[in-house]
Image (spheres, rainbow, N blue to C red):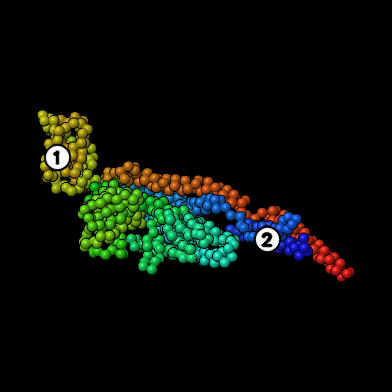
Amino acid sequence: MSGGSIFSIGLSGLNAAQAGLSTTSHNIANVGTEGYRRQTAIQDNRLPRFTGAGFFGQGVDISSVRRAYSEFLNQQVLAAETQQNYLDAFVAQATQIDSLLADPESGLSPALQDFFAGVQDVASNPSSIPSRQSMLSAAQTLTARFQSLDQRMTELGNGTAVEIRDAVGSINDIARQIANLNRQIVTSQSTDARPANDLLDQRDKLVADLNKIVRVQVVTERDGSYNVFIGTGQNLVIGANRLELAAVQSADDPTALDLVYRTPVGDVLLPPQTFEGGRLGGLLAFRNGTLSQAQTSLGRLALSLADSFNAQSRLGQDLNGALGQDFFVAPVPQVQTRTTNAGSGVLTATISDVAALRPTDYRVTAIASGFVIENLADNTSQTFATLPQTVDGVDFTLASGTPAAGDSFLVQSVRFAARDLRVGLTDPALIAAAAPVRATAPLTNTGNARISAGVVGSVANLPLPGNVTLTYDRAANQFVAAGAAPAAGPFPYTSGQPIAFNGLEFTISGTPDDGDRFVIANNTAGVADGRNALLLAKLQTASTVGGNASYQGAYSQIVSAVGNSTREAQIQGEAQDALARQTREAEQSFSGVNLDEEAANLVRYQQAYQASAKVLATAASLFATVLDIFAGR
């Protein structure tokens, strides 16, 4: 074997040891670099040289520098982290609204209790102006609490919108960087045919950051570039090209944001469900789910309170002897016309049945064959040939104009009802605490029959134009009505059974004698009458919201729904945090830098370098000996 070959072998060993030292030093220097994966210098023995004595080795070459990368482990980390960030974003927002609604002092419950305590006080002291004023003050506090809760929810929605804009900006920035790195990686690897490890790490780190914002799927092309898809498969980065997202004012609702693709021919709307996973997915789930449901449910409660309380108030009589009027100013539905509508149609919406209302918004879309009314809470729809139509207690009417096919209207039936709820009375004397009629029994009656105070179901025939007398006819076992009111009866008599006429209902019980009379008259001196106030107080426990829940019960359902969804997300988040930590640890154990291992590699490569240097020194000594031999001749 020639001295030259020994020199070549020793030099290759020096180069290999130096490459190992350089790679190890690079690993140690990047031990704290997020997203960095351990690199290893790959050594391959050179092809041996054949001689008559056999094959002799030619040394070593560094064929590549390989990074420790497992696509399987990386995909596990991405899946765990996108769900972790989704839950973290959702819980951070939902916790705020949960604390708001469940607060024992600033929630709605204490204001409801104080208001109905004021109503009960008026029922007990109907002629007391201070009691009436106290009831009005409690009503003002109640409506202010509704408004405050709605305002806080609106602020949460606005804050969520800001975070959505920030998330979209981050997505665009990361997409730009990934596209640039795709370009650099393709260029580098096509020139050298070696993996651009540090560039690959940077790109994978950007993909991981993007995945924390919105779920991503990655497809690797043959040239090494990434195609990145988000959500349910929407393009974001294709090689060196990228698409840009934007958060823009909704064409349906100026208070909301829509997410769109920016294209040369205009914006392309992306449905919220497009963005699954990640922080953006959590924000959208909170905005379109928990927040929307809580705000519309609170609005339905406010509208139910106003409707039922006003209905009973109108059946009473105020301190001046006049029939009662609305106590609250009842909110009305809001209709938003899409800004891109081409037709002239104008849609209006009114509430016809508060008990049938659902906590949701509706979208009315004109089609060639009529109209589609979509419930946005459960995405169910109904198609009608014409309007007006009634759905869930809401009357949808085409007030004027002709809509074009595709024109759309957003109907927010109860969303802003809590915000718009107001007290309609300012004068405490106008509180309808009394009933507008009274029933009396003359002292001349000889039987033991008694008549109830009566229930007013309608004031269409009030005040009475004159007294109505019910006279008992024993032979026919019936009461005959006489007086100025519209004719009614006769009424067969059964003790305890109601007698109803002209919107009034009374109950006579006991045994009347022939000719016994009961007189129904206007309540002309009812300043001390609190009968209607008692009925107003009973509304506190009546099933007036949705036909199956009291005011307090409906509010408890809202608090429970928000609390349950928040707690469920918190529990899932804790489990997901543990899963994400475990997957990161598994990935790091495979690809992370271990300083103990790198320290051992430093010693190993140092010794290899020293040994290769010794080979060179030996080769030099042998060459010198040969020169000495030739010099001696």
Mark 1: amino acid: Thr
The N terminus is located in which quarter?
bottom right
Question: Does residue 393 appear to the left or right of 17 in the view shown?
Answer: left
Q: As rendered, which of 26 and 416 lies closer to the eye?
A: 26
Are circles 2 and 1 on residues that touch, CB within 8 Å?
no
Which residue is at the far right? Answer: 632
Disc 2 crowd rating (10 Å Cα; few below 14, some 14-19, many 20+) is some
What's the residue at 28%, 63% (across, down)? 341
What's the residue at 12%, 40% (across, down)? 488
What's the residue at 34%, 60% (across, down)? 253
Occupied quadrant, residue 489: top left
Cα distance, mark 2 to mark 1?
119 Å
What SS does tag 1 mark? strand
Q: Position of residue 181 (x, y in %)?
A: 53, 65
The C terminus is located in which quarter?
bottom right
Question: Does residue 414 appear to the left or right of 284 in the view shown?
Answer: left
Report the residue marked by disc 2.
61
Q: Position of residue 117 (x, y in %)?
A: 37, 46
Mark 2: amino acid: Asp
The vertical placement of 547 against 232, above or below, is above
Report the residue marked by disc 1.
469
Which mark identifies residue 458?
none
Q: Position of residue 244 (x, y in %)?
A: 44, 65
What's the residue at 45%, 57% (across, down)? 230
